[in-house]
Image: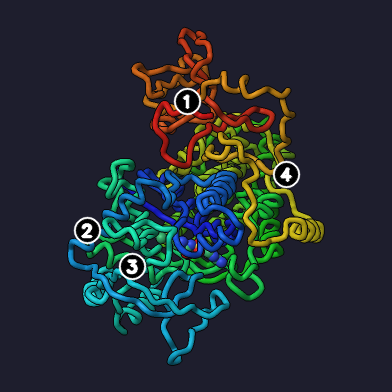
Amino acid sequence: MKKFYITTPIYYVNARPHLGHLYTTTIADLIARFKRQRGFDVFFLTGTDEHGQKIEQAANKRNHPVKEHVDEVVAEYLDIFSRYGFSNDHWIRTTDDYHKEAVQELFRKANEAGYIYKGYYEGWFCVGCAEFKEEEEQGKAPFCPLHDREAERVSEESYFFKLSAFQEPLLKYYEEHPEFIKPESRRNEIINFVSSGLKDLSVSRVSVKWGIPVLDDPAHTIYVWFDALSNYITALGWGNKVRSGFDKYWPADLQLVGKDILRFHTVYWPAFLMAVGIELPKTVYAHGMWISGGRKISKELGNIIDPNILLKFFSRDYVRYFSAREMVFGLDGDFTYSALINRVNSDLAKGLGNLVSRTLKMVEKYCQSIIPSAPKAFTSPDASESWQKTAQALRDSTIELSKVFELEFNDYNFSRALEAVWEIISKVDKYISDSVPWNLAKDPSNKEHLDTVLYTSLEALRFITAMLAPIMPDSTLSIWLQMGLANKPNDINPESLIWGELPSGNKIGEVKALFPNLDKDKLMAEIEEEKKKMSDSNEVKPAENTSPITEVVAVTEPVIETAKEPIPELKPMINIDDFLKVDLRVAQVLEAERVPKADKLLRLVLDAGEENKRQILAGIAQYYTPEEMVGRKIIIVANLEPRKLRGFESQGMLLAASIGEAGKPVVAGFLEDVPNGARLK
Ligand code: MSP
C-alpha cells in the first residue's frame, strides 16, 4: 500500500484559533481524505506549538501559569477542531515529554556532527515572529510590519547552528528536487534568498525560560523554531520510544504551510535534517493568506474570523467547500461572509442541491423510488436513437471531467478541480431540462427514454458524489443515502468507478433538502449581532465543554446536518459516586466482522490492556465497515454486565455519539495516542 504523510504547521497557543489555522487544517484534511479514498495509507499530523517567549508573555498577560494557559488554549483547539471533524491521526503538543526528549536528541546530534557552537548574539528580535530581524538603518530598531511594532535589542550567550555551511547543499538540493518547494514562484523567492548568503542561526536562549533545556547546559532553552520544526519527526517516534511510524511514513510527502513561514520550512528545516543525516520532505507547499479588511487575518492585528461564529451559522461542509473553491490555492484570498453566502446559494443550493433533489424526486414520482435498470444506451452497441447518443455524450464528458478533477486535485488546484465537477453539474442540469422528462412521463411508450434520462442523471450524480466526498463528507454521505447506495462515498475510489454499475432495482432513500437557500440580509444581520456579542478579541476563553471526557473525544466521522441538530434533554442529576461506578476504558479494535443475519451488528475483538481479549457487539454495522474499525482506539464501558446477543457474548459497550432521529452512531475516539486499558475519569 502506498503511504502518504501530510502535515500542517503546529499552531501557536498565544491566542485562540481563527480562520487561518482552520484553513491549513481544512486543506490538509481534504487531501488526507482524498488520498485515503484512493487507497493510500495516510498519516495526517497537526498540533500545537507551545514554547517560547510569546507564549510565556501571553500567559503572563493573563496572570496565568504558563502550563495552565497552554492547556486552556489547546483545549479550545481540540474542541473546535473536533467540531469541524478533522481526520488527523495524531495531535502533537510540543510540551509532550516524548517530543521534548527527541528535540534534545536532535540538538545533541547536530552538536555531535559539528554544526553547533557557542557564542554571543546581539541583535534585533521580534517577539511576534520569534526571530531576529535584519538591521536596515544602523543603530535603529527595525520595524516589523507583520506585528506592527519595533523589534527589541537582545544580547546574550547563545548556541549557534552553522546554517552558513548549508548554503551550497541547499541550493544544490533545490536544483535537483524542483518539487521540494511549491508553488514555483515561492521556490524562486527561496532560491534568491539562499543565494544571497546564509548567516549562522542562534538556536538557544538564556532569556527564555519556557522552552526545552539544552542537555548538559540547562540555562539555555532551545530556540522555538528548532523545537517546533522537529515535531514532524518526533510525532513519528524519531528520537523517542513513545511514538512510532518513522520508518513507515518519513519522509513527509506534503508539508503544508502558510507563505509566512515558508522560509523556516525550506531553509532552516532542511538544514537541520541535513546536519543529522535525515532525508528531506518531498514537498513543502506554501499557501496564501486569508485577508480581511485589507490585511492578513491574524491574532496580532485583531481582525480574526472566529471559527465558532462560522460554525454557528454555516455547516462545516460549507466552510470546507468555500475554502477549497474561493481561495486559489497558493494565492491570497479575501474573506467575507457575503462571499461565503453567495457561494452556498449559487453553487450548493441552486447547483448541486437542486440537481440532487430534482433527479431524486423524478425517480420517486416516475419510478416508484426504484432506480431503473441500466439503459441500452450503455449496454447495447446498437443504441442509435438521438436521445441515446445524448446520454452517451453526457457519460463521456462526465468521465472526461472526472479525469480533469483528478489531475487538478493531485496538483492541489482545488478550485479548478471543483470547477470541473460543477461543469458536470451544469451539463446534467441542461441534459434534464433539454430532455423534458415530465413530458416524457405523460406517455408510457416513452418509458425507455425516460428511464435513460433518469439513469444517466443518477449515474452522473454517483460520480459527482464520490468525487466530492473528501471536500464535503457530511453532505455527500447524505446524498449517498438518499440515492439508496451501500457503503459510504468515502470508501469508494472515484478512479475505479465504472459507468453503468449504478445498481438498478435499488430503492432510493427519503429525499431531503440538502442546502436550503440562505437569506443573505437576515443572516448578515445575525452574524453582525453575534460578532458584537462574542467580540472577536484575542482573549483566550475556556473551551465550551471542559468535562475531562469530552475534551479529548474527537468526532472523526462526518455527521449530517450537525448545526441543526436538537440537543437531547438532560438526564436527572447524578453524583460523582454514581459516575465513578462506570468504568470507562480505552480499547483498540483488533478484529471486526459483521454478525450473520444481524444487519446492524459488528462483532469487535478488543485489546483493553487486559490479559485476555474482549469481545463486544456494537450496533454500528450500517455506518461503519469492519475494515474501518480495525486498529481504531475506542472507549468502552468495561464493567457492564455481559449479555448474549445473537449467540455471542458482549463483554462491554462502545461509546458513540447518537445523531438525529435515526440515532446514527459516531464512534468516540482520541486525537492523541493513548495506551490500551487507560481509564477515563
Ligand atoms: N507555530 C508556528 C508554526 C510552526 S510549524 C513547525 C506558527 N504558528 S501560527 O499559529 O502563527 O500559525 C501558522 C499557520 O497558520 C500559517 O503558516 C498558516 O498555515 C496558518 N495561518 C495563520 N493565519 C493565516 C491566514 N490569515 N490565512 C491563512 N492561513 C493562515 O507560525
Residue at image coords 75%, 54%? 518
Which residue is under mark 1? 585
Residue at image coords 59%, 59%? 18
Q: CA distance from mark 3 to mark 1?
A: 42 Å
Compared across the picture, whether 646 is left or right of 307 comes to: left
Q: Earlier in the sequence, mark 3 or mark 1?
A: 3
Q: Residue type at mark 2: give it.
A: Lys
- The residue tagged with tag 3: helix, strand or loop? loop
The residue nearer to you, when weighing 378 against 91, is 91
Q: Earlier in the sequence, mark 4 or mark 2?
A: 2
> Disc 4 vs disc 2: which is toward the camera?
2
Residue 669 visible within the image: yes
Q: Earlier in the sequence, mark 1 or mark 2?
A: 2
Q: CA distance from mark 4 to mark 3?
A: 72 Å
Q: Which mark is residue 438?
A: 4
Compared across the picture, whether 198 is left or right of 578 comes to: left
Q: Position of residue 632 (x, y in %)?
A: 42, 33
Q: CA distance from mark 1 to mark 2?
A: 39 Å
Q: Position of residue 239 (x, y in %)?
A: 27, 49
Q: Position of residue 478 (x, y in %)?
A: 61, 39
Q: Are marks 4 and 3 in contact (CB under 8 Å)?
A: no
- Decide: few, some or many residues near mark 1? Use Cα within 10 Å; few <14, some 14-19, many ≥20: many
Which residue is under mark 2? 109
Q: Residue type at mark 4: give it.
A: Trp
